[in-house]
Amino acid sequence: MSSVDAGLIAAWLAARSMARDLPAPVPDRGGWRVDTGLPAETRRHVFAAACPGLVELGATVAEPRVLLKLAAPHAELAALLPPRWRLEPLAHVMTCADGFGAGGAPDLSGGYRLSVARDGDRAFARIAAPDGALAASGHAAERDGVFIYDRIVTEAAHRRRGLGRALMLALQRTRRSPAARQVLTATADGRALYASLGWQVHCPWSTAAIPE
C-alpha cells in the first residue's frame, strides 16, 4: 500500500460526482465537501489525511445523514471523533495499471447480452440475462487524469459467471486517455475480487456517520 495521493482522491471524488450527477466537490476545511442532497445523505466531507478541519466537523456536526470520510484505517478516524459517531464497514480505494484486462473479455455464453452507452466522459454498461432481466450493470467516468469504475453490481442470481469482469472490460474500452489512472472503491468482499484482476489497494477508506 502506497502513501495516500491527495490529488488522486480529489480527482476520484470529482469523477464520482460527475458519474452520479451530483454537485462538484468544493474545498472545505482541508478536504472537500459534496452537497449530495440525497434522502440518506445530505452531504459528505472527504479528507485525504487527518487535519483540524476534520476534528472540527466531528465536534460540531450533530445531525445524521452527514458522512465523514478519511483515507485511513478505522482506528485513525475513530480517534478523532466523539462517541456519537459510528463507523461504517471499511472500504478501500484501489488502483490498477494498464495491464488490467490483458487476457481479453470473457465469453458471455448462455444468452447474456452486453451493451454500453456513452455520454461524453461518462459510460454505462449493462448485461441482460436470457430472459431480458438486468443481470449486471456498472458506470464509469473520466476526469482530471483518472478513470473511475462506479456501482459495479452483479445480481445475486447471476454471480460467478464472469459478468463483473466483462462489465469492467467493456467500460475500460471507453477510456479516452490511456494515461488516465484507473480507480475504484471496494468493499471487503470486492477487494478480493479486484485483487484477483490485478488491482492494488491504494489506501483504506473509512466512513463515519451519526445514527438516526
Image (cartoon, helix red, strand yellow):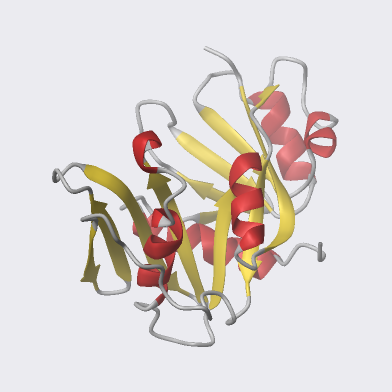
Q: Position of residue 70 (x, y in %)?
A: 70, 45
Location of residue 200 (image quadrant): bottom right
The image shows residue 190 at horizontal and vertical percentages of: 58, 47
Position of 89 compared to 176: left or right? right
The reply to whether residue 145 is visible in this rendering is yes
Rendering coords of residue 128 (x, y %): 21, 51
Q: Which residue is at a point 35% across and 70% down the rendered structure image?
A: 170
Along the line of sight, the residue nearer the viewer: 105 or 54: 105
Is 19 located above or below residue 142 in the figure?
above
Q: Quadrant of residue 157?
A: top left
In the image, is 143 to the left or to the right of 57? left
The quarter in which the N terminus is drawn is bottom right
Residue drawn at x 47%, y 37% as measured from the top left: 43
Q: Quadrant of residue 113?
A: bottom left
Q: Residue at x 64, y 28 (%)?
A: 88
Q: Residue furthest left?
A: 132
Q: Is residue 70 above or below residue 88?
A: below
In this view, the residue in front, 210 or 3, is 3
Q: Residue at x 72, y 67 (%)?
A: 5
